[in-house]
């Protein structure tokens, strides 16, 4: 993405902010190593989804960078649900494993909710277990889903005190939209959540000091939908054709029409180079936090 240098100051740079977090995690991992503790993340990948394979590879590379041990369990599509649940039981009981991550999507014959429920809440580095979701709702310290956690860090990098601000979150998934709302509420924002059944979304977004878009529709948010000087967090990752005449080349865009809104807003995360980088950094952070809690630090 080429950005007009005059507008560069508006960019909430995922590379810089995730770099700082990664450095902090690396230092803490080193401190744990000195106490004889080696944080270890188990990653379970089922099937051949190319995007999942890329995500798992990126997670492994970052684990190596921060000094977290990663153990990969790869299975083909035919894996039985009972075998997955048995593996999770083994990992739950293995004191050398500190975090467990099942890469979604998983084949449809395996229940996603049963899988999430089976992971020990103490090792649930995706923060999806109902116990962690409940703790988040009660503003109790817990493993928080990585993408909303990373989005909050980005928001707070440009606005120290967001208390009393209007925040609008587009999307209501358990992975992004719902925990995002909860984090914003816990920071004293006035939060509105909109979704596919919402009437007149623009009437909400145009009054938002903070707008978080997580719906998976390319360039959905245009400039007349956003409030002047809003903070925009674009979670969406959408692959689109590079130009109308080009059939083979593609590029990544967010849910927000970056070029259309950048003049009007105060800050915005780019896609790529924004929230996605924070998500993996926060996974490292969650693995670190899980390890510390399991060892009573
Ligand atoms: P999801 O589970 O498919 O949820 C999408 C949400 O968007 C749903 O709540 C849906 O509403 C809502 N929605 C769909 N069409 C809409 C419309 N026209 N107007 C308003 N709301 C609409 O997706 P997700 O897992 O939350 O992910 C959302 C996006 O974020 C995707 O592009 C995904 O690739 C991306 N993502 C990025 C990261 C990252 O690290 N950057 C991490 C996770 C996800 P209903 O509930 O009414 O159906």
Image: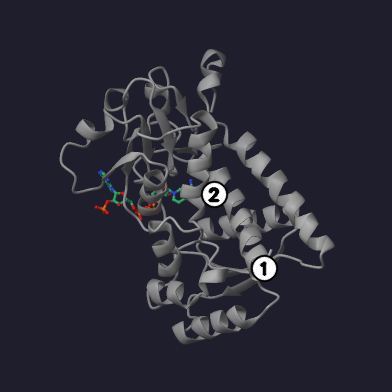
Q: Which residue is label 2 attached to? A: 279
Kind of element beneath mark 1? loop
- Percent of width and height locating residue 54: 58, 55
Residue 234 visible: yes
Kind of element beneath mark 2? helix
- The residue closer to the viewer here, 77 or 190, is 190
Relative side of 238 to 6, left or right? left
Residue found at the far left of this picture: 199
In the picture shown, does residue 3 fall above or below 32? Answer: above
- Mark 1: few, some, or many residues within 10 Å (few <14, many ≥20)? few
What is the image's colouring? one colour
- Point 55% across, 20% down: residue: 8
In the picture shown, does residue 59 fall above or below 240? Answer: below
Looking at the rendered structure, which numbered label has been put on residue 296? 1
Relative side of 114 to 16, left or right? left
- Percent of width and height locating residue 119: 51, 74
The C terminus is located in which quarter?
Answer: bottom right
Earlier in the chain: of badge 1 and badge 2, it is 2
Residue 271 visible: no
- Percent of width and height locating residue 217: 34, 42
In the picture shown, does residue 90 fall above or below 182? Answer: below
Residue 263 in which image quadrant = top left
- The residue closer to the viewer here, 106 or 100, is 100
- Point 45% across, 33% down: residue: 242
Relative side of 16 to 50, left or right? right
Looking at the rendered structure, which numbered label has been put on residue 224? none
The verdict on label 2 being within 8 Å of ligand 1 is yes
In three-dimensional space, the C-alpha distance between marks 1 and 2, rounded to whole angstroms, equals 25 Å
The verdict on label 1 being within 8 Å of ligand 1 is no
């Amino acid at each position: 993405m080429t950005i007009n240098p005059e507008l560069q100051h508006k960019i909430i740079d995922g590379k810089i902010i995730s770099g700082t977090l990664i450095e902090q995690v690396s230092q803490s991992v080193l401190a744990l190593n000195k106490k004889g503790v080696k944080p270890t993340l188990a990653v379970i990948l089922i099937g051949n989804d190319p995007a999942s394979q890329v995500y798992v590879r990126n997670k492994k590379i970052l684990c190596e960078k921060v000094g977290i041990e990663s153990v990969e369990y790869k299975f083909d599509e035919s894996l039985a649900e009972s075998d997955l649940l048995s593996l999770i039981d083994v990992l739950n009981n293995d004191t050398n494993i500190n975090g467990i991550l099942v890469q979604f999507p998983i084949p449809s014959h395996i229940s996603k909710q049963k899988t999430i429920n089976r992971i020990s809440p103490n090792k649930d580095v995706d923060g999806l277990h109902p116990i962690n979701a409940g703790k988040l709702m009660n503003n109790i310290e817990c493993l928080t889903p990585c993408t909303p956690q990373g989005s909050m860090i980005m928001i707070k990098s440009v606005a120290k005190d967001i208390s009393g601000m209007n925040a609008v979150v587009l999307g209501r998934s358990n992975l992004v939209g719902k925990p995002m709302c909860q984090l914003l509420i816990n920071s004293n924002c006035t939060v509105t959540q909109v979704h596919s059944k919402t009437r007149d979304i623009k009437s909400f977004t145009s009054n938002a000091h903070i707008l978080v878009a997580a719906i998976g529709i390319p360039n959905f948010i245009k400039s007349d939908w956003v409030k002047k000087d809003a903070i925009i967090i674009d979670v969406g990752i959408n692959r689109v054709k590079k130009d109308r005449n080009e059939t083979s080349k593609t590029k990544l865009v967010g849910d927000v029409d970056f070029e259309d809104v950048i003049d009007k807003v105060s800050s915005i995360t780019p896609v790529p180079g924004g929230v996605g980088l924070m998500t993996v950094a926060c996974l490292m952070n969650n693995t670190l936090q899980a390890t510390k809690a399991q060892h009573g630090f």
